[in-house]
Amino acid sequence: IWLPPAAVQQVSLKATIIVIMWCILLLAGLAAAAASDPYKEKRFEYIVKNQKLHLGYLEKKLHAIEEEFNELSADVDRKTIRHLKARISNLEENHCTDDQSECPGDVPECVDDLLFCDGEKDCRDGSDEDDDTCSLNITHVGSSYTGLATWTSCEDLPPDHAVVTITAAHRRDYFPSRVWLRGTLSYEIDEKDHVIHTIQLRGYYNFGKREIALGPLPGQKPGYGVICDFNLGDDDHADCKIVVPSSLFVCAHFNAARY
């Protein structure tokens, strides 16, 4: 059937109006249905209340667990944490080169050991300039570190006490990453007559490696040196080696404690 264009436009307009009216009626019906549900709000309130009760129960249980945990042991102190970190670090592979040291913080990072305690923060977390890292406690004059030395070479001596004593310490302003030291190494060479052999030494303390390295004085006849690594988590215990200075060949080893 042919209709003039004006009639076609009029039919399309009416159809559009009808569709819009139906949409309006449908929306109104949905809104009325929602508003007419007398139990919807109550169901919602019940769900919220039930969730609040459940959260309250969980919170109560959590507090009870916290109280029970607190009764089991006291808080771990910083010293214990440092000891545990040191034990883990000693078991791990060293990823730094010989002239580098690992930053003391929790983020693994290697920095040249000459940059420790020089007044500039070179580790990302600044731990190379921390008070603990740059403490002079290890190098206090009069400090003695002793342990039972086990000779594996160089001397035919039974295990006996060896003592490293700091007799002088000086830190130069132009080279702050080292503390220059003088000290002595004493060990017993005759257990029966209690003959003690003492060697005068000089060397330095390396902040980055937490290491004392001492060798013979200039002009002194060849003897022994000593290297002590404070890698046990505090300033009072060290892993020490008696070495041949020219080659660093290890003659004896002792776990030293300050006294």
Image: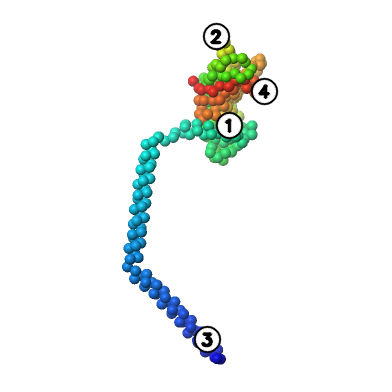
Asked where in the image residue 134 lies, by quadrant, the reply is: top right
**Residue 234 or residue 89, whichever sits in front:** 89
Q: Position of residue 205 (x, y in %)?
A: 58, 26
Foreground label between 4 and 2: 2
Residue at the location (54% across, 25% down)?
Answer: 238
Looking at the picture, the colour scheme in use is rainbow
Label 2 SS: loop
Label at residue 57: none
The residue where tag 3 is placed is 9
- Give the amino acid at mark 1: Gly
CA distance separating discs 4 and 2: 32 Å
What amino acid is found at the position of numbered circle 4 in the picture?
Answer: Ser
Whether residue 77 appears in this view of the structure is yes
Q: Earlier in the sequence, mark 1 or mark 4?
A: 1
Q: Position of residue 140 (x, y in %)?
A: 52, 23
| Residues at circles 4 and 2 in contact by the CB criterion of under 8 Å | no
Comparing 82 with 72, the one in front is 72
Mark 2 / mark 3, whichever is N-terminal: 3
Label 2 amino acid? Lys
**Local crowd size for mark 4, using a 10 Å CA cut-off: few (<14), some (14–19), many (≥20):** few
Q: Which residue is mark 1?
A: 208
**Quadrant of image for the N terminus:** bottom right
Residue picked out by circle 2:
192
Q: Tell me the residue at 55%/8% (across/down).
A: 193
Is the Cβ of the residue at disc 2 closer than 8 Å to that at disc 3? Answer: no
Q: Nearer the viewer, mark 2 or mark 3?
A: 2
Which residue position holds label 4? Answer: 247
